[in-house]
């Protein structure tokens, strides 16, 4: 078994502490001297399975910032883990290009009743039959307590013990590959969580040169920044190489404050490029960015950052606002059908135009030669559901036909589509914001969350004095777990069949992705033409009749009628026609 001390496998433990005069690994009552190396590094080899802490000079021993395993939580001792000991069964896995594939985002803790990586393996057959090609895991690194979203992680090289620890992640990826499913891991390099972060004890991981929503910035451009940049780049390479990840989703890269001559994202993409050939399979870096800048995915040789793809929030906002009529907050410039047309045709709505929410001009146009598969689009994800006051999904408010229309526009678009766990069967279970901090920090998180939603915007949706769930309450977490038996309900089964049909059509018609689209609209209808496919949705309460049908009916939601001269759609319906 991996981690068994009796195996006597020696594993290097490496600490970056450039300002220290001495460094030690503390094992039980022993204080073992570490060897200095160039660049401010210290090393020692310990048997796999050894519990240890690290210390510099005469300071208190703390968990290893590069710990691979925190079996006792973020404040407890680290445990030596030999990533090379796992017996992979995927040597024939050649991978596939995740860009253009159908993504499925899941949160390990709420995806199954058990909330573990091993229990998620049991759902791989289901995901494969659904037509999913890439599974995107929300962050799995350790965070305080047992339950959380994972974006407040502090041990960026480890795997959360409640999910099963590091070997469980290897088992999950291995099993996914056996099902011909790629795996994308969500990683967070823009901040550490507020509790259990001991990295600054050992080295200058932070700088006051920049302000961030989390306080001091990650040190990417101040004194000793090289060690922090190595920490990030080596972490990414480790997930790709030692855990066989096929892609990494880089969280909120707009929060990476870096005035270096080479931005950290350009350095990361350069270093990943250097290992691609040796991996023997395609890998990808996907950025979450709200900057609306095509330079994110343009090549470094042209002044870009060289990232393979980026999330396209504007597509979500345009779809969501059009279907729901919500135009508050960051939706303020969205809603009209004309804005949805721009998002589907040109990706960015704010492409140098004025953003009312930001109070300034924002973004830049997407050049026509950029493949639209390099933009990840969605109608739901963890943020757009979980950051709502109640964590409610569109299915709670919208007629099923409107939800089906949004799914058709998404899955038959040229973008890389992403589904969020359970949306494929139209679940109305919420995905709420939940944490498991200690009493003091937990109280602050609860107060902050509740005060965030005191404004009138949310009252317009939920009514006066909305009862926002307490993030610290166990019930908030439990309410966010998927209810798998829902699939057998006729309404949910119908929605699941609809998603399967759309994904099937996508695979048949756009096996390697598609091109750009053209869209038009009228009162109560919207039409998107993408290659041989025409999608017409009637999300409103009145039926519509359109002339000159293009193609034959391949899928429908509602009693759609197509004649030689017209397409007749009832209220809340969808027609998919193919040339």
Image (spheres, rainbow, N blue to C red):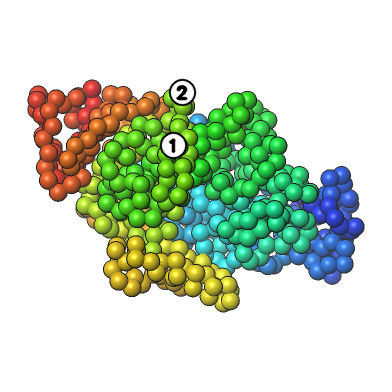
At mark 1, the secondary structure is loop
Q: Is residue 512 above or below residue 486?
A: above
The residue that disc 2 covers is: 369
Which residue is at a point 9% across and 25% down the rendered structure image? Answer: 565
Give residue 301's position: percent from left, percent from top.
63, 25
Residue 132 in sight: no
The mark tally for this picture is 2
Please rate how many residues cluster around mark 1, counting C-alpha atoms within 10 Å: few if below 14, some from 14 to 19, many from 20: some
User: Which circle's residue, 1 or 2, is located before the other in the chain?
Assistant: 1
Measured as percent of width and height from the top left, residue 176 is found at 50, 42
- What residue do we see at 35% from left, 55% from top? 328
Q: Quadrant of the C terminus?
A: top left
Residue identified by numbered label 1: 351
Against 11, residue 391 (above or below) is below
Residue at the bottom extreme of this rendering: 439
On the rendered structure, is 308 left or right of 515?
A: right
Q: Element at badge 2? A: loop
Q: Is residue 509 left or right of residue 559?
A: right
* Residues packed near mark 2 inside 10 Å, few (<14), some (14 to 19) or many (20 plus): few
Between marks 1 and 2 in the image, the one whose residue lies nearer the viewer: 1
């Amino acid at each position: 078994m991996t981690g068994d001390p009796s195996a006597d496998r020696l594993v290097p433990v490496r600490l970056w502490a450039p300002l220290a005069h001495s460094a030690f690994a503390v094992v039980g009552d022993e204080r073992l001297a570490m060897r200095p190396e160039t660049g401010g590094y210290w090393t020692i080899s310990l048997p796999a399975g050894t519990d240890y802490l690290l210390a510099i000079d005469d300071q208190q021993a703390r968990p290893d910032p590069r710990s691979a395993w925190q079996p006792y939580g973020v404040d407890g001792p680290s445990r030596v883990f030999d990533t090379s000991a796992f017996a992979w069964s995927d040597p024939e896995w050649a991978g596939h290009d995740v860009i253009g594939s159908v993504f499925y985002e899941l949160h390990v803790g709420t995806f199954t009743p058990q909330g573990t990586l091993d229990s998620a393996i049991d759902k791989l057959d289901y995901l494969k039959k659904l037509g999913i090609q890439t599974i995107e895991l929300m962050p799995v690194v350790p965070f305080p307590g047992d339950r959380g979203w994972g974006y407040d992680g502090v041990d960026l090289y480890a795997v959360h013990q409640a999910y099963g620890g590091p070997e469980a992640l290897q088992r999950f990826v291995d099993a996914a590959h056996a099902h011909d499913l790629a795996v994308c891991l969500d990683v967070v390099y823009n901040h550490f969580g507020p509790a259990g972060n001991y990295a600054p004890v050992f080295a200058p991981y932070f700088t006051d040169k920049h302000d961030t929503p989390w306080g001091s910035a990650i040190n990417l451009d101040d004194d000793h920044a090289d060690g922090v940049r190595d920490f990030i780049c080596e972490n990414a390479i480790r997930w790709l190489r030692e855990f066989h990840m096929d892609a990494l989703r880089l969280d909120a890269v707009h929060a990476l404050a870096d005035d270096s001559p080479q931005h950290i994202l350009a350095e990361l993409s350069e270093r990943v490029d250097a290992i691609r050939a040796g991996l023997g399979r395609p890998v990808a870096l996907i950025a979450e960015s709200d900057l609306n800048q095509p330079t994110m995915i343009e090549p470094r040789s042209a002044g870009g950052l060289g990232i393979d793809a980026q999330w396209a929030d504007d597509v979500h906002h345009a779809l969501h606002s059009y279907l729901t009529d919500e135009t508050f907050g960051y939706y303020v410039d969205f809603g009209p059908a004309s804005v949805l047309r721009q998002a589907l045709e040109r990706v960015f709505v704010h492409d140098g135009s004025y953003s009312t929410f930001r109070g300034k001009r924002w973004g830049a146009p997407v050049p026509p030669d950029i493949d639209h598969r390099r933009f990840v689009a969605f109608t739901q994800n963890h943020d757009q559901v979980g950051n709502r006051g109640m964590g409610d999904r569109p299915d709670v408010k919208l007629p099923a036909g409107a939800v089906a229309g949004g799914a058709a526009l998404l899955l038959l678009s040229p973008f890389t589509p992403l589904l969020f766990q359970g949306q494929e069967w139209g679940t109305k279970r919420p995905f709420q914001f939940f944490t498991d901090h200690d009493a003091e920090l937990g109280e602050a998180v609860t107060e902050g969350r509740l005060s965030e939603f005191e404004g009138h915007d949310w009252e317009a949706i939920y009514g006066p004095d909305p009862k926002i769930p307490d993030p610290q309450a166990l019930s908030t977490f439990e309410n966010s777990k998927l209810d798998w038996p829902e699939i057998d309900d006729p309404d949910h089964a119908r929605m699941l069949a609809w998603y399967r049909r759309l994904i099937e059509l996508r695979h048949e018609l756009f096996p390697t992705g598609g091109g750009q689209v053209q869209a038009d609209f009228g009162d109560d209808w919207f039409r998107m033409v993408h290659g041989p496919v025409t999608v017409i949705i009637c999300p409103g309460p009145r039926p519509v009749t359109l002339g000159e049908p293009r193609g034959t009916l391949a899928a429908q939601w509602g009693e759609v009628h197509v004649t030689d001269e017209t397409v007749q759609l009832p209220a809340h319906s969808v027609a998919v026609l193919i040339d």
